[in-house]
Amino acid sequence: MAKFDLNDDSVVVVIGSGAGGGTLSNELAQKGIKVVCLEAGGRFDTSDFINDEWASYAHLAWTDKRTTSGSWRVAQDFPELPAWIVKAVGGTTTHWAGASLRFQDHEWKARSTYGDIKGAALLDWPIDGAEMAPWYAKAESKMGTTGTNDIPRLPGNNNYKILHAGATKLGYKKVHTGNMSINSQPRDDRASCQQLGFCFQGCKMGAKWSTLYSEIPKGEATGNLEVRAHAYVVQIEHDAGGKVTGVVYADGDGKMQRQKARLVALAGNSIESPRLLLNSHSALFPHGLANGAGQVGRHYMRHTTGSVYAVFDKPVHMYRGTTMAGIVQDEARNDPSRGYVGGYELETISLGIPFMAAFLEPGSWGRDFTATLDAYDNMAGLWIVGEDMPQASNRVSLNTDFKDKHGMSIANVHYDDHANDEAMRSHAFKQGAAIYEAVGASKVLLTPPYPSTHNLGTNRMSEKPEDGVVNRWGQTHEVKNLFISDGSVFTTGGAENPTLTIVALAIRQADHLAGLMSRNEI
Amino acid sequence: MRVVDKTTRVGRREFLRTTAGAAAVAAVAPTVSGQALAEPLKTVTSPAAATLVQMARDLYPHDALPTKFYQSAVSIIDTEVSGSADTINLLADGAVELDAAAKKLKGMPYAAIADEVERVAVLKSIESTPFFARMRSGMVTALYNQHDLWIKFGYEGPSFEKGGYLHRGFDDIDWLP
Ligand SMILES: Cc1cc2nc3c(=O)[nH]c(=O)nc-3n(C[C@H](O)[C@H](O)[C@H](O)COP(=O)(O)OP(=O)(O)OC[C@H]3O[C@@H](n4cnc5c(N)ncnc54)[C@H](O)[C@@H]3O)c2cc1C
Ligand code: SF4
């Protein structure tokens, strides 16, 4: 395995080893480029995963303090827990569910398609569906996405069968077990899904794609990739000319280290990436790196979400099998006659008793609540994933009142629902309830959003430097050898779970970086 | 379908002691349920402990659950608050506060009120206190994260050791129209 010197300024430093960073690291290493990937969390094996909701959360999730503000329900229910993000090698691809959907063509062009929506800062992506199609194909092949590359779809569990029965009764047509980056048959040296039911806690079978065991070991095998766990980057440094020279990080013993770099690719997910840029302010960049236009941290998106749980008279056991076991895609289209622009997907979800108690009706107590929980084994559930509107005031900023243990200001996450988000959520709640009522639900519960699992948009991609943070390649408008490689580059969010797009963008970016480097343009 | 046996087989005595009867028993001899705690609480003395256990059940009442789960939950919260000088008196003071509210509204200590609806009315009157907030939010994990309680909700939990649910009923629903 490669080991690079701290003073080796020919390496690419990648910050974060999740969907974006882990993929980029491997792709670059495959092309013969030397990479040091710095990851704040520890490194674990599939056998270390804990199939117990809270224990797994404590084991892998990012639990450093964050604060919230704004009128979103999460700020009220979980004021110090705006997001569920993992801090470990593999990032949130250890806990993700595997749903892997492409953007629809019109979603790359949200501003042109939806028009001028009051209060929304909509923008077209500088790239489109045709340009992304080959990169999506590479991502699906890499991740082993079911329903693509002749990979059969997964079998549906009880939770899915209920969704399917209700949805088809309502006349929905695009109902299936999803495009999941979970092996339905052995592939890529990984086993097939045994329906363990703990996708959100890390797949002990390794059936679900994760950079932890899919990308990173392959990159390491080339001899070009060194992954350093417990390396928490606190600052990105630059020279007098405004070019990035390396990063400072706290190692596992809390000692500060400086790793030099030819270029830096930041992939800490959409809360930590802007936080690190803002915390890297200097005399030359007084408002933070790459923040000359004041755009870093703005346009935070988290998808319009919510869940519908239904109680039946007979057993369901929704916890058995894949967590996201199936999908209804008919409402993902853009059809403003429904009273909002954009669309949403409905995907099955299930929580175990510990999370169900915490998230079903946050803050509730008493007999009404416990009567529902008593029927836990008779419950089915779905999750809404819809496009939310980017707003300049929805943002990640520094909360200078609190410092982390390295003395760096923590992140505050501010979010207000847009009227379009609220209209979409009520429509989705109504349709979700109708699906279950169509097959005899005796009770339907509308569950408010969980802490954000899809964090997007805080370093958005824009044609013009004044509208965003990075260009069409994820290169920051302001600093030539600084790139962003995670979901924070999303110009708009689409209705789809974001990871396939993050991975496709990372593969494409690696190709571009290799070109720039070989032509000595960077 | 492979269904889960979630019944708690308890005799009538246990039933009385754990559900509707709990308050009555506590009123007559408060130390009875207090003593039933496996270990004494760190921050609360025994009569107040029984009050807290009753409150715990009233917050998240599941008639099928034996008292031991509520006792464990209170112990867990007790251990949590014992760790900080800011919270070490929260439960003891809270139990006094709760009894004061009960006396004001119903003329007797909390655990002596026989009717659950009346106890809930007392709880509502202290809903905005930090003590109530801590007990309520603490219970969500302290109660529902007890592994041996899951099966009583029909939740089987981890399956890896058993080969997953692939051959154990993940798709065995048989009642759909
Ligand atoms: C429960 C759950 C289910 C999900 N299901 C799906 C799904 O089905 N489909 C889908 O598309 N998406 C899903 N997601 C979302 C998906 O996991 C994320 O979109 C994706 O992982 C984001 O990739 P990323 O590269 O932006 O960040 P991450 O994967 O979160 O990786 C970021 C990494 O950077 C590290 N890091 C951060 N700051 C620093 C620093 N300063 N120094 C060093 N390292 C740092 C972090 O520790 C982390 O490991 C789910 C998420 C969760 C929580
Ligand atoms: S259900 Fe399948 S994908 Fe999910 S954890 Fe289990 S084996 Fe892995």
Image (cartoon, coloured by chain):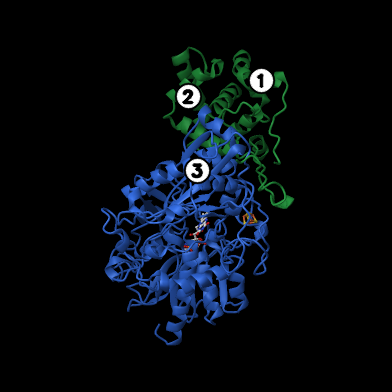
What colour is chain B? Answer: green
Image quadrant in which you'd find residue B176: top right
Neighbour tally class for label 2: few under 14, some 14-19, many 20 plus, Cα within 10 Å: some
The one of A309 and A278 positioned closer to us in this rendering: A309
Q: Mark 3 lies on which chain?
A: A
Residue on which the image places disc 2: B123
Reading the image, the residue beneath label 3 is A435
Q: Is mark 3 on a helix, strand or loop?
A: helix
Secondary structure of the residue carrying numbered label 1 = helix
Chain that appears blue = A
Identity of the residue drawn at 55% across and 46% down: A163
Q: In which quarter of the image is the C terminus of chain A?
A: bottom left
Is residue A345 shown left or right of residue A189? Answer: left
Q: In this view, does B135 lie above or below A471?
A: above
Amino acid type, label 2: Leu
Give the vertical position of B139 relative to A185 (above or below): above
Quarter of the picture containing the N terminus of chain A is bottom right
Q: Mark 1 points at which residue?
A: B17
In the displayed structure image, the side of residue A117 where residue A438 appears, left or right: right
Residue A288 placement (x, y as % from top left)? 33, 65
Q: Which of marks 1 and 3 is in front?
A: 3
Of residues A292 and A169, the one drawn nearer to the viewer in this rendering: A169
| Residue A464 falls left or right of residue A486 | left
Taking the spot 66% from the left edge, 40% from the top edge, the residue there is B147
